[in-house]
Amino acid sequence: MKSPSESPAAQWHTVLRAIATHDFGVVQSDLPMIHAADGRTLRINEPPTGVVPRQAAVLILATPSTDAIEFVVTRRSGALRQHSGEIAFPGGRVDDTDESVYACALREAHEEIGVPASSIQVLGALHAVYVPRSNHMVTPVVAWLAQTPTYQSNPAEVAEVFHLPIHAVLGNDTLQIEERLVQGETIRVPYFPFREHRIWGATAIMLCDLAARIERYRTHRSSGHKESE
């Protein structure tokens, strides 16, 4: 981060701008994925051979809190056919036009939670994540919202809107592992606990990418490197 004289919001804006345009050596294959009990990776970040994924995007929207930042997340409607009831970032499929992933993320945020694109500053993006269940390659677009608006959620898609504090995903003890029995096999699923919820799947992978880049950025800065390097 920069000078201590800067506000926490300004410091975090600098961090997010940096990690949204540079991966600082974070390799997505090293991020926590679903594993079998014997250590085999059960989720890879690419579609099966011959399968062309559909493009999608989500908006990782950061907004200042008292001493740090929070991310806008939603609990998806239970009426949705896919990923119902899960905690996720606002997002959806790229239109079958020339729409970019950035435009898609902004459009979906407006449609789902009522935040206009004009109030959002796009900073960059993280590694795209492949979602096998829906065959989507999802780009997480990182953005900044200077002031928290009054959300106007679409009840057909969103059951609730939350703010997830950054400290809920940073640190060695924030990510938990849950064992599940699926089709007779024990699998190990990483997740972030949040209130009474578990944030897992693609959203957890994106948060792991974000957290890993922040830690690498801090190391980069503490070693004396300039931001432009």
Image (cartoon, grey):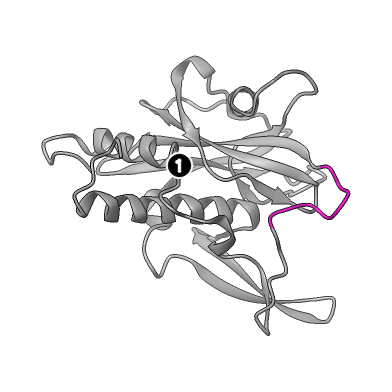
Q: Nearer the viewer, residue 36 or 7?
A: 36
Asked if the magenta segment contains residue 221, the reply would be no
**Residue 212 pos. (x, y %):** 43, 56
Image position of 68 (left or right of 210): left
Image position of 8 (left or right of 131): left
Quick one: which residue is furthest to the left in this view? 5
Quick one: which residue is furthest to the right in this view? 50
Q: Amino acid at mark 1?
A: Phe
Residue that label 1 marks: 71
Residue interval drawn in magenta: 45-52
**Secondary structure mainly formed by the magenta segment:** loop
Image: 169 above or below 9: below
Q: Nearer the viewer, residue 45 or 225?
A: 225
Image position of 195 (left or right of 190): left
**Residue 195 pos. (x, y %):** 49, 58
| Number of numbered callouts drawn | 1
Query: Where is the C terminus found, in terms of image quarters?
Result: top left
Asked if the magenta segment contains residue 46, the reply would be yes
Quick one: which residue is furthest to the top in this view? 118
